[in-house]
Amino acid sequence: MPRSTRRRPPAPRPRRRRPAPPPTSLFDTFGSPQEDASLLEDLVALVALGLLEQRTSPEGTVFALTELGYRTPASRDAE
């Protein structure tokens, strides 16, 4: 007597997931060019006032507070 074999339905294929985007760092996140230009203008103005100094580093340009910048109290506009 021939044996009947039951056929199993095919197993569903696993869905392919899109690879996760690489994590972004602060240095990889860029604003609009207009925002960048405004920020650079503000930083250059603060350098001209003597509140910041511009330094170069391996990562690029860095702005640091000067002694005068440390002694200057925060403005009420910043609140």
Image (cartoon, rainbow, N blue to C red):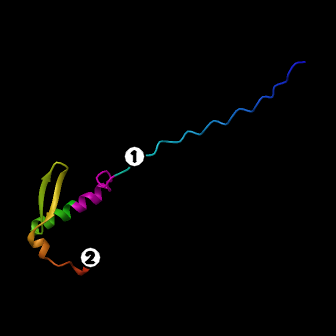
Q: Which residues are magenta?
A: 25-39
x and y, in percent, of residue 23 in the image: 38, 49
Query: Which residue is drawn at the image coordinates 39% and 46% (left, top)?
Result: 22
Q: Amino acid at mark 2?
A: Ala
**Which label's residue is closer to the chain start, 2 or 1?**
1
Cα gap from disc 2 to disc 1, whole angstroms: 34 Å
Asked if residue 35 lies in the magenta stretch, the reply is yes
Q: Nearer the viewer, residue 3 or 43?
A: 3
The residue drawn where x is 10% and y is 67% is: 66
Q: Is residue 22 above or below residue 13?
A: below
Estimate how packed mark 1 is, as few (under 14), some (14 to 19) or many (20 or more) residues with alpha carbons within 10 Å. Answer: few
> Where residue 59 appears, x then y in whole percent?
20, 49
User: What residue is shown with label 1?
Assistant: 22
Disc 1 marks which amino acid?
Pro
From the viewer's side, name the closer residue of 75 and 59: 59
**Residue occupying the far top of the picture:** 1
Q: Quadrant of residue 1?
A: top right
The circle on residue 78 is: 2
Residue 79, image x, y percentages? 29, 79
Name the residue at 81% across, 28% down: 6
